[in-house]
Image: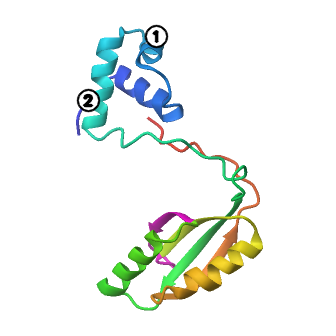
Amino acid sequence: MEALDETDLKLLRILGNNSSFTIKELAAQVNLSPTPVLQRVKRLESSGFIKKYIALLNPEKLSNGFIVFCNIKLKQHDRKIGHHFVEDIKNINEVVECYNVSGEYDFILKVFARDMKHYQDFVFNKLGSVESIGSTHSIFVMAEIKNLHNISV
């Protein structure tokens, strides 16, 4: 792993919280001139520390504020079934995150829906069409307490 100094870590913390700063604004925050800050940011991007820049959308404003974590058990465990499940899930818009996990379940999905009726339709018509699913277990979010969208550096 490439060694990062305190300035690199500070840049990552700043950009992890708000990636819309200009190079000039970043430079002022880390007490450097813009040219070395631009070089550092480009190096952090090219070496994979910064994967991409995105806009975080407000699901409630877009009428998709009903959040559900859906635990999935596959019917069987083999490469073909797992591959089909992954490909099917990638094509379902309501699923915004998918993790392959250990333990009682095989996958955890984070799902955004408009409301309970929309989620019910999602379960019956979209998840129901994924043949590799053996069972599901839904957990409904009552309130989001913490979501930093980045990691601690």
Residue 38: image location, x then y, percent: 32, 20
Q: Quadrant of residue 142?
A: bottom right
CA–CA distance between discs 1 and 2? 19 Å
Q: Are marks 1 and 2 in contact (CB under 8 Å)?
A: no
Q: Quadrant of residue 65?
A: bottom right
Q: Is residue 79 magenta?
A: no
Name the mark on residue 15.
none
Q: Which residues are magenta?
A: 95-106
Mark 1 secondary-structure assignment = helix
Can residue 78 be seen at all in this image of the molecule?
no
Nearer to us in this view, 137 or 36: 36
Nearer to us in this view, 35 or 77: 35
Q: Is residue 98 magenta?
A: yes
On the image, numbered disc 1 is attached to which residue? 28
Name the mark on residue 43.
2
Residue pictured at 68% horizontal, 79% vertical: 121
